[in-house]
Amino acid sequence: MTARAAEITATADSHVAESDPRVTPMMRQFLEIKTANPDCLLFYRMGDFYELFFEDAETASRALGITLTTRGKHLGDDIPMCGVPVHAADDYLQRLIALGHRVAVCEQLEDPAEARKRGSKSVVRRDVVRLVTPGTLTEDNLLDSRRNNFLAALARTKAAGDDGFALAWADISTGEFGVAEAARLELPALIARVEPGELLVSDALYDDPALRNLLRETRAAVTPLPPAVFDSTSAERRLRDYFSVATLDGFGPLTRAETAAAGAVVSYVDRTQVGGRPPLSPPIRETRGAVMAIDPATRANLELVTTLSGDRRGSLAAAVDRTVTAAGGRELTRRLASPLTDHARIAARHEAVAWLVDNAALRRTVREVLRSAPDMARSRARIAVGRGGPRDLAAIRDGIAAAHALAGHLGEVPDAEGPDRLADIAGRLRAPQRAVHAELAAALVDAPPHLRRDGGFVKAGFAAELDQARDLRDESRKIVAGLQAKYQDDTGVRSLKIRHNNVLGYFVEVTAQHAGKLTAEPNSQTFFHRQTLASQMRFSTGELADLEGRIATAAERALALEMEIFDALVARVVADGEALDAASAALGELDVHAGFAELAVSRDYVRPVMSDDLAFDIHGGRHAVVEQALAGAGDGPFVANDCDLSPPQPGDGSEADGGRILLVTGPNMAGKSTFLRQNALIAVLAQAGSFVPAESARIGIVDRLFSRVGAADDLARGRSTFMVEMVETAAILNQAGPRSLVILDEIGRGTATFDGLSIAWATIEHLHDVNRCRSLFATHFHELTALSETQARLSNATVRVKEWKGDVVFLHEVVPGAADRSYGVQVAKLAGLPAAVVSRAREVLHKLEETDRNAGAAGIVDDLPLFASHVRRAAAPAAAAGSPSVLAERLAAVTPDDLTPLQALELLYELKALAANQAADPAGGREQR
């Protein structure tokens, strides 16, 4: 419990003193409920409002920007209070949850009339019916329809040591439930992929210094819980109870850590849903390496699902999304976040897309039907926990209809022609019972209201008793109109009206100037006074009171009958829940396949050739996001480029057991970063099951993807831009393997030139010799191009530019070779630097380049001796111009094989003396000829 929560609890305990007569019954009830939920803001239902009191009111008023007022006194002090209307509560909940608050919703559990029967001071029974937290949302207006909202739990078992971690995640709004084991180093990538809305951890993990940064960096709301929640033994029991099974063997070989994490999830769900269990599917165990590992920094750099600013627009997901259903949008997001590594599963996805590309007519039909499919999964989940309404039942009705229609269209294809993936989808689409759809279609109106309490959602003719009650209710309205006309005639007051409100019921209303006609004889015998207002007077009659009773009974009876029908329909939907979940998942998968096919046709994407080797050969590759941005802005076509990171062919004298490194040089703004990113995105798309933006692509399965692109600091953790760069680079060098794909941009640019150059040089050597992975490395350190002569699998590439009248023209073409300039001054001019600054920069650059040319490459050696292979070529001509030194002639006369150990030692001393003499007198160290 947090310190703040403990303070609130202590305050509440002091308030609830039973013996203190100053504590009102209502306030005693409030404080008792608040004491039981100290970490939550308490939404206390009072009529048509949720009220908040004391510290909760102060917190909510600041967070929501609503007025803080007072309501009476408590123990002599004013009670701070604020409130939100019930009908708008979801909007306020959304804002509070987004700010990291948790809310306990306390409802009235009985009618106030029932409470009054127990005495005039009796309080309406209330209790918490739900805890609303970031990971347990089900309402559409609180959720993103195209993304999952996972509740995750992180567990660690001591027996497994520090690396015995497991993560379980569930979306209670759709029923999905997964679990995976992970080592400590794998946790950031796993949590970033799942991207939970709320992460549950034990108090021990929450306080663990080794995990502090991980928990701080996650976007999820982190909720610490007592260690007992993560006990693996009790977790197994909770899982058996939740899924009503005798053993967990049917869920696969779950480890202790996985069982603990999954048990923590269902325990928290039970606690927050207060008896209304969401229909979770059994936990699906994900094997290690089943999906491409992508760490948080890489996900952010590549902007797979959202941009760096958190928007979906501008991300890869937004660029390739052609889905037309909410389920399809979630499935697409999941695939882009979790690209597969299994060759067979990837091929099955590609085959389904290829078949829909070739069958254009069927693809158009499928997409048209899919547009009519509502979000069946989330409607089904709300119905199961008692929060569903008539529109959710209508969504199930329309979803089943769409599923059966799609199954029919897919079933028209002969089994021998259609891919197995689509056949499997068709089978799941047929799973929901037609009888359920028939009953929903017969019972519900085409466009039912949102709330069942409003009534009017059952079709006329479905239930005879309901029709009779409605007829009486509706006929009574005609009777009221007739009675009003009669009273107008009897009194001569044409403005007389019969009205209704919740306080007086039905009443006769006249203006004040006509009130005397109703109070005078003989009308006073019929009309008796009810209420006087400033400009009206209200009356009633015995006849009107009798009519009101009959109308109220008919309306209440009609609504009660609709409630009974609603409950029966809910029971039918719940009973067919598993089939509905299967059909909903199949709808999403089919939508993604059809969307990928539509994307391939409209954007000229090709099917990649996948393999289990280290191939990576892209011809005419394009950046999916930038290409569409250019087309939308009318800025011309995207310039496609090739990229070959495949191992060199055997027989050319190089090692063929590692991927190629492509060292890319070129000016700023030429497109180096775009080139790097586009190849990483092509790998993601290919393994997600999509065709790719290229003329052709052959890709060996990538097991891990790393990206170090862009610059950002982390001042909150005391990290400069360069420190962040080095931390991310260290993670890559420590984790990348032969099957990884690494893209690095401008390593070493955040420090002094020689420091950065040395780091970049050593990084390339490590990638080449140790990691042996396929890599793209962009740099402005042109000296690094010399490595191509010593590193067998490293090739140079550059981005072409043209100079025209002092300006630079970017051609965006990546070609073999190396750049010798970065054109930084020209780019500064394009950016709008003052002309004087640009002119002075040209002067300084000219002088620096002149100095560098005079010093020559040999000048670098004194500062950075690791460039020996590059320097020897420039220094050799200078050495040849002079005569050989005494030291060189003495060495030339030595035959090492003829020396004894003693002679070798004596020779070493002799050579050392000659070297010292030569250093002291270079001229004297040579023979004069």
Image: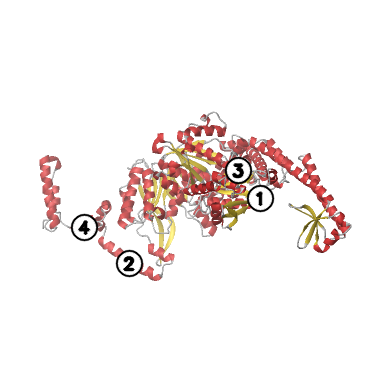
Q: Secondary structure at mark 3?
A: strand
Nearer to me, 700 or 557: 557
Q: Residue at x 21, y 57 (%)?
A: 878
Mark nearer the viewer, 2 or 4 = 2
Q: CA distance from mark 1 to mark 2?
A: 77 Å
| Relative to 538, residue 244 above or below | above
Instruction: Point out which mark residue 129 bears.
Output: 3
Label 4 belongs to which residue?
A: 878
| Relative to 540, residue 167 above or below | above
Q: Earlier in the sequence, mark 1 or mark 4?
A: 1
Nearer to me, 402 or 27: 27
Q: Secondary structure at mark 4?
A: helix
**Tag 1 near tag 4, CB within 8 Å:** no
Task: Please state the horizontal and vertical placement of residue 447, each as a whole percent of the image.
Answer: 70, 47
**Tag 3 near tag 4, CB within 8 Å:** no
Q: Earlier in the sequence, mark 1 or mark 2?
A: 1
Q: Secondary structure at mark 2?
A: helix
Label 1 belongs to which residue?
A: 47
Q: CA distance from mark 1 to mark 4?
A: 96 Å
Q: Secondary structure at mark 1?
A: loop
Q: CA distance from mark 3 to mark 2?
A: 73 Å
Q: Earlier in the sequence, mark 3 or mark 2?
A: 3
